[in-house]
Amino acid sequence: MTSTKTIAYVTDIHLGQQLQIEDGIGNGKMGYLSNPDEHKENFIVILNDMQKRGVQEFVFGGDIGAKDANWWFFDAIKKYQLKLLMVLGNHDTFAEVGKHYNNSLIDGKDEMNYSYEDNQRKYIILDSSSNSVSNGQLDWLGRQVNTSKKILLFIHHPVLKINTLIDEIGAALNGREELKKILIDSAKDITIICGHYHMTDEAIEKNIRQISTVAGSYQILKESSKVTTDQNSFGYLLIQMDGDSIKPETVLFKQA
């Protein structure tokens, strides 16, 4: 018997981080200034929209933002009837997030990787907060993909290459080819949901389908000769699972 399930994927909210771009050699160098209120309204809009749509479970895909914003992030979520699953991004740390988020499924003591299953799928969460996936996690992943179920994998960084400038100038996941090999060699039906690049993209390679989604803070234009941002839009991803199918829907908002 198949079942229908809808979850949300919210990522790259960058609370308290005001984007700055220096265009020195045409590629652009990105950095952040401290601004305690930055992007907080965006997150409240997203939480309210999820509540309005009846979403009961969401995955946060990484990059809460400034260290001091962690407490505000988790406190805001407590006001809603939402089950939260955490993924760590490169602006997060296990030590800081662990003060606020406890999940008995977490496999290690210093990395936030874990898995769980329902009747249809196996869900795997990897920790790429170090801009890589550790050897320990790769070994663990090799065991986790040994399943008869379809796999939905959540990770902050893209695993498959995205044809965009950001991928070429240092933002790509270190060691992603080794990770990709484990997934391909498994020959399982695998869907990856990721963020990090602040853009929508869908890629397929062999048994892997990768869905990259919008950011909750600002967007980066995919097809551009230099780093170009859109700071007037933000959003998140709805993931509808119906039997074997996964249907992504982008929810996008414009700044007032």
Image (tube, rainbow, N blue to C red):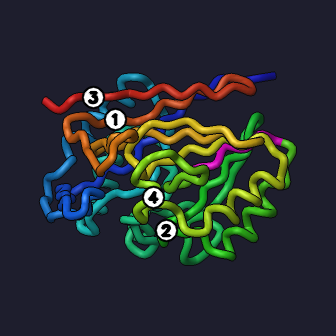
| The quarter of the displayed image where residue 256 is located | top left
Dot 4 crowding, Cα within 10 Å, few <14, some 14–19, many 20+: few
Q: Does the rendering let one see residue 60?
A: no
Q: Which residue is label 4 attached to?
A: 168
Nearer the camera: disc 1 or disc 2: 2
Q: Is residue 211 left or right of residue 30?
A: right
Q: Residue at x 69, y 25 (%)?
A: 245
Circles 1 and 3, Cβ within 8 Å, touching? The answer is yes
Image location (x, y in percent) of residue 156:
49, 55
User: Is 55 situated above or below 186?
Assistant: above
Helix, strand or loop at label 1? It is: strand
Q: Earlier in the sequence, mark 3 or mark 4?
A: 4
Question: Residue 160 at x, y = what percent?
Answer: 60, 50
Helix, strand or loop at label 2? It is: loop
Q: Specify the amino acid type for callout 1.
A: Gly
Instruction: Mark 3 vs mark 2: give the one in front.
Output: 2
The residue labelled by disc 2 is 131
Residue at image coords 64%, 60%:
114
**Residue pointed to by mark 3:** 253
Between tags 2 and 4, which lies in front? 4
- The answer to whether the residue labelled 1 contacts the one labelled 4, judged by CB atoms less than 8 Å apart, is no
Disc 3 versus disc 4: distance between alpha carbons? 28 Å
Q: Which of the pair 153/167 is nearer the observer?
A: 167
Marks 1 and 3, the one that precedes in the sequence = 1
Residue marked by disc 1: 235
Q: Which residues are magenta?
A: 149-154
Which is more N-terminal, label 4 or label 2?
Answer: 2
User: Mark on residue 170?
Assistant: none
Overall secondary structure of the magenta stretch?
Answer: strand
Please say whether residue 225 is one of the residues in the magenta stretch. Answer: no
Position of the N terminus, as image quadrant, is top right
